[in-house]
Image (tube, rainbow, N blue to C red):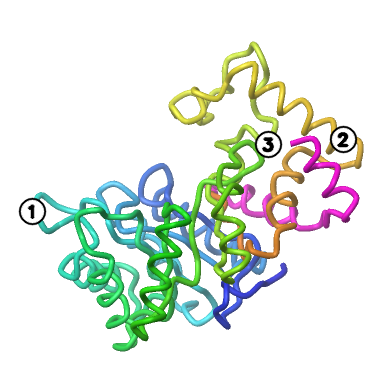
Amino acid sequence: MEYRNLGKAGVKVSVIGIGCNQFGGKVDAAGTKAVVQRALEEGVNFFDTADVYGNPNGASEEFLGAALEGERERVVIATKVRFKMGDGPNDVGSSRYHILNGAEASLRRLRTDHIDLYQIHAWDESVPIQETLRALDDLVRAGKVRYIGASQFSAWQLAHSNLLAELSGWEQFVTIQTHYNLLERDAERELVPFCAWAGVGILPYFPLAGGLLTGKYTRGEPPPAGSRGEFSQYVKNRLTDATFDKLDKLRAFADSHGRTLHDLAFSGLLHRKEVPSVIAGATTPEQVSENAKKIVWKLSGEEWGELQELL
């Protein structure tokens, strides 16, 4: 396994991270334990969850905390706050009230005294960003959070937030989670260039585009039984000729270099130094090991140029 700094932060994370959104839902407690144990064996030390993951909400954090018992000092845990966690008017959003309550609840579920990376799950137009940033800064000063991150922010929202934090002497966001893969490249318009300039780490989610970039789906054929294509609207919306045309080109490129489409999906993201870790969901230990192998292909400058021209 390889490790990179989490943006400008000094802490290092594995270049393959575990997305925990299926823990507490599709993956039960025993399955979570098996996935986590395999991840540790593969050298993975970065686990990304959120308070809203799992059924009921919070189950992912609970299962992850239990699975990491006795291993806490080996790992970097990231979680998120922002979305609805109850029926009350203050059980949602990025207000000081909800953030501080959310952090305490996450700490209990994760069975830890600190969160390594605490992320705002999405921009909240109803709350001044100054209030959000000050609450996060207080959590860092209290020792309950080590670093802070954002998720699903636009480039201007991230830049505005970090400038305010810098001018106020508060903690700045060291990472941004964004929807980014070889088929979804809107982040390259403004977010990637800004992060490269500002030293903010980019944590791509959906790096495999719901399985499309593993070669799992075939043009003109129904999705395989049990795959996301059977139930995920995200995948269903992308099972188009235009998508398969792109996949055919990407697969041909990978084949010409003796690699697979799955290899290319990870190598194409990790070629960017702004990406400290690619967050990949896993429901079985075998998927963890398969993803961990995808760090071998280091794109050369020539290969990178070919890929950019193709894209």
Residue 88 is marked as: 1
Type of amino acid at the residue the image marks with label 1:
Gly
Q: Residue at x 58, y 15 (%)?
A: 222
The magenta span reads: 282-311
Which sits earlier in the primary sequence, circle 1 or circle 2?
1
Q: Which residue is mark 2?
A: 255
Name above or below for residue 177 compared with residue 67: above
Q: Nearer the viewer, mark 3 or mark 1?
A: 1
Q: Residue at x 22, y 71 (%)?
A: 131
Q: Which residue is mark 3?
A: 214
Type of amino acid at the residue the image marks with label 2:
Asp
Type of amino acid at the residue the image marks with label 3:
Thr
Q: Residue at x 71, y 21 (%)?
A: 245
**SS label for mark 3:** helix
Residue 261 locus on image (x, y percent): 75, 38
Quadrant in which residue 279 is drawn: bottom right
Which sits earlier in the primary sequence, circle 3 or circle 1?
1
- Residue 113 showing in the rendered view: no
- Mark 2 residue crowding within 10 angstroms, few (<14) / some (14–19) / many (20+): few
